[in-house]
């Protein structure tokens, strides 16, 4: 089996998630999206320190449950202490948020209660709403403005060093791979370990690429916007609409699409690493949030979140937020994850077939320790079993996975 030996190999050979952990470990590394596939490190930096924190190269579940924790290691969903359905008690936070506004409500509470001095998360760039950028928020207004999912590449850990220059304590919000990168950083770096008050993640089926997003915007607006005025992916209802507006050929243009329509198109442009992701559920965070998809959006339901508490620290924080009245829990039920996220179980099954095909094609593959895959693959129907292997072999050629994605500049 060929492993990744440096972050340049991770980036060149389709293993990079774009998290930005390497840029924290080595300040000579920065992140750029030159080719439209995703944010990638611009230099190799000091290969060993950057590689040591890279979730694209290796993920290891063994360090995930502390010895004093009651959490159980679920083979599919990782460490689980408790599972709830809930939502932000403030109606506007709930409505503006993606599912139940839980991430925004917990971030706001952490800041307003003085538990942390800042929140490191991601927002649309004021200069270009199609660009997603890390943001250190230090006021309630800033936290509220970051609400809502952006189905786009992001690199929140590339903002970690600058954030820790400004504050001593942080709440971090990121994709599962970002939370994994932060976990790896914290294992090595005392400053980061002592400064992260809480880490929140969300269920993640993958990040559509920048070029995929741009193409979709152009198709919807009927041409290239110059400039793009606004872009939102969902929220203001559950799941809410994709909406964009801009100036196209000198005229104002705007468009909307349902969540199902927009995600249906955008997801096709996900970076390859998302197809072989073993952690779609934020296993390395204190709390992971997702959509309570076991309910069907009907235009009336204001939305609620699936809440997976993974650590004792996360449990204490959630209990405190409930006592303060900022979030409301509807029910506790461990079966909710399977009810809400069953499609991710098939995705784990396909992982075994996909990795097998990559090895047959002599491609470099990430090392995933402690993630059962075969037992989920064997449960797939025959079509998906075969498809996971043969489909990947086809993709090796169609997506040119054997070729260098982009030369580091
Ligand atoms: C790319 C992506 C894929 C997702 N896939 C799934 C899925 O398959 N199943 C599922 O149940 N849920 C998925 N989600 C999560 C879901 O959309 C909600 O984020 C989650 O339910 C939490 O909702 P909320 O209302 O509590 O969040 P909110 O209160 O709206 O807060 C959202 C937070 O997420 C941060 N954020 C937004 N976009 C990004 C990004 N691209 N990278 C890093 N941070 C970001 C914001 O900064 C904000 O802090 C996905 C989200 C994203 C961004
Ligand atoms: S996965 Fe993260 S740490 Fe690894 S190369 Fe990509 S950006 Fe850097
Ligand atoms: S699917 Fe996995 S690799 Fe892709 S963005 Fe989500 S957590 Fe990261």
Image (tube, rainbow, N blue to C red):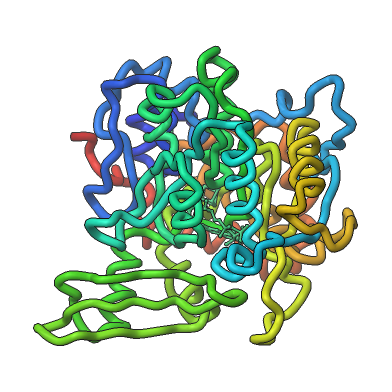
Is 194 rendered above or below residue 242?
Answer: above
Give 108 or 398, whichever is nearer the viewer. 108
- Quadrant where the image shows the N terminus: top right
Residue 6 visible here: no
Is 219 rendered above or below residue 399?
Answer: below
Q: Is residue 14 left or right of residue 405?
A: right
Residue at position x 59%, y 74% in the image: 239
Residue 202 visible here: yes
Is 369 rendered above or below residue 271?
Answer: above
Residue at position x 82%, y 58% in the image: 329
Residue at position x 49%, y 35% in the image: 118
User: Residue 169: where, in percent of width, then height?
Assistant: 54, 26
Q: Is residue 101 left or right of residue 326?
A: left
- Quadrant where the image shows the C terminus: top left
Give 278 or 209, whichever is nearer the viewer. 209
Give 307 or 402, whichever is nearer the viewer. 307
User: Residue 312: where, in percent of width, then height?
Assistant: 80, 31
User: Residue 325: where, in percent of width, then height?
Assistant: 76, 53
Q: Is residue 155 left or right of residue 310?
A: left
Q: Quadrant of residue 313?
A: top right
User: Residue 3: where, in percent of width, then height?
Assistant: 49, 29
């Amino acid at each position: 089996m060929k492993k990744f030996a440096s972050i340049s190999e991770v980036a060149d050979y389709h293993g990079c998630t774009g998290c930005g952990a390497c840029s924290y470990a080595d300040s000579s590394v920065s992140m750029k999206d030159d080719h439209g596939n995703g944010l990638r490190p611009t230099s190799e930096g000091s290969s060993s320190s950057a590689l040591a924190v890279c979730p694209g190269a290796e993920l290891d579940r063994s360090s995930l449950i502390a010895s004093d924790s009651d959490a159980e290691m679920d083979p599919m969903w990782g460490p689980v202490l408790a599972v709830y359905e809930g939502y932000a008690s403030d109606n506007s936070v709930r409505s503006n948020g993606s599912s139940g506004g839980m991430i925004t409500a917990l971030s706001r509470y952490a800041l307003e209660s003085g538990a942390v001095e800042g929140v490191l998360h991601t927002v649309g760039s004021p200069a270009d709403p199609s660009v997603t950028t890390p943001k250190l928020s230090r006021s309630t207004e800033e936290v509220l403005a970051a609400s809502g999912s952006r189905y786009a590449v992001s690199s929140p850990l590339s903002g970690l060093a600058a954030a820790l220059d400004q504050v001593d304590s942080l709440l971090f919000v990121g994709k599962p791979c970002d939370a994994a990168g932060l976990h790896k950083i914290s294992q090595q770096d005392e400053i980061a370990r002592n400064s992260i008050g809480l880490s929140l993640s969300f269920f993640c089926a993958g990040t559509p690429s920048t070029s995929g997003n741009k193409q979709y915007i152009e198709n919807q607006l009927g041409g290239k916007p110059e400039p793009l005025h606004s872009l939102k992916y969902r929220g203001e209802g559950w799941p809410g609409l994709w909406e964009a507006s801009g100036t196209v050929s000198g005229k104002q243009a705007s468009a909307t699409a349902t969540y199902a329509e927009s995600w249906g198109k955008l997801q096709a442009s996900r970076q390859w690493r998302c197809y072989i992701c073993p952690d779609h559920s934020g296993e390395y965070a204190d709390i992971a949030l997702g959509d309570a998809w076991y309910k069907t959006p009907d235009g009336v339901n204001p939305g609620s979140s699936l809440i997976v508490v993974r650590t004792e620290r996360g449990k204490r924080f959630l209990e405190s937020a409930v006592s303060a009245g900022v979030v409301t829990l509807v029910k506790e039920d461990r079966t909710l994850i399977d009810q809400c996220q069953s499609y991710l179980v098939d995705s784990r099954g396909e992982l075994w077939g996909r990795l097998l095909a990559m090895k047959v094609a002599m491609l470099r593959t990430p090392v995933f320790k402690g993630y059962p895959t075969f037992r989920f693959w064997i449960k797939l129907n025959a079509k998906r079993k075969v498809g996971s292997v043969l489909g990947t072999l086809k993709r090796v050629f169609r997506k040119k996975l054997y070729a260098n994605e982009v030369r580091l500049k």
